[in-house]
Image (tube, helix red, strand yellow):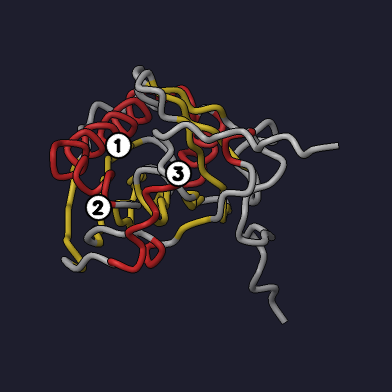
Amino acid sequence: MADDTQGWAKHSGEIHGAAKHLEGRKLTGPQQGFGPLWQKTYTVEIPGHTPAEVIAEWKAHYGEFWPAHSKFNAPLAGIQPGEVGTITTAKTLSTGIMVMYGDETSFAFMTPEGHPFAGWITFSATGDDDWAIAQVQLLIRPNDPIWDVGFMLGMAKGEDAMWRGVLRKLARHLGSEHDPQQETIKVDNKRIWGNARNWTKNAMIPRRSPKPQPQ
């Protein structure tokens, strides 16, 4: 019988043993977020490479394709299931991701509490022996009311520009002059008001250190 768990991270639903600001943070799927649910798909054509070659290069150089205004610190073990990467920006945002899945032609991240959005980010490549299409697909909700307002005020466009930029850098790295394409679908316009208190974990709000216990 095939092992259906092959390629998936073995995790407890929380991040442990990574950066201090992520310690104990729960992983958040779309239903743990707050704002409207979006599916965003970004693609770029990369001739001259197989899908497996594209993904291998993407994993090996992932942080190099990140935008200049922020930094992705890849896990020491690389983009492997169960590993945690951290993200910092010039605007004092400190967050990260957990690698939830990985194989030869795809890998996927899941976001923790406090991240701007709750959900999945899936990276994949399809095609044949001499032509590949690289894709980033997000299934996400803004994580809390603060991020929801931010997305309405321009963060959503910034997110789109970031992922198109990532794919453009990947394409140029692999010798492709094609430009990325984008498709955006609003899957659900409703807000999950039961998750409104997610704002207390917002990654832009500094975490208080625990008070020392009396001896």
Label 2 sits on a secondary structure element that is strand
Q: Is residue 128 visible?
A: no
Front residue (pair 196, 95): 196
**Residue type at numbered disc 3:** Thr
The furthest residue to the right: 215
Front residue (pair 25, 129): 25
**Is tag 2's residue or tag 1's residue first in the polypeptide sequence?**
2
Residue underneath mark 2: 40
Residue 140 in the image: state x and y as whole percent.
32, 56
| Nearer the camera: disc 3 or disc 2 | 2
Residue 76 in the image: state x and y as whole percent.
68, 31
Residue underneath mark 1: 163
Q: CA distance from mark 2 to mark 1?
A: 10 Å
Residue at 38% x, 35% y: name it.
Answer: 48
Q: CA distance from mark 1 to mark 3?
A: 21 Å
Q: Mark 2 near mark 1, Cβ–Cβ under 8 Å?
A: yes
Residue underneath mark 3: 50
**Is tag 3's residue or tag 2's residue first in the polypeptide sequence?**
2
* 211 to the left or right of 91: right
Residue at 29% x, 67% y: name it.
Answer: 192
Badge 2 crowding class, 10 Å Cα cut-off, few under 14, some 14 to 19, many 20 or more, is some
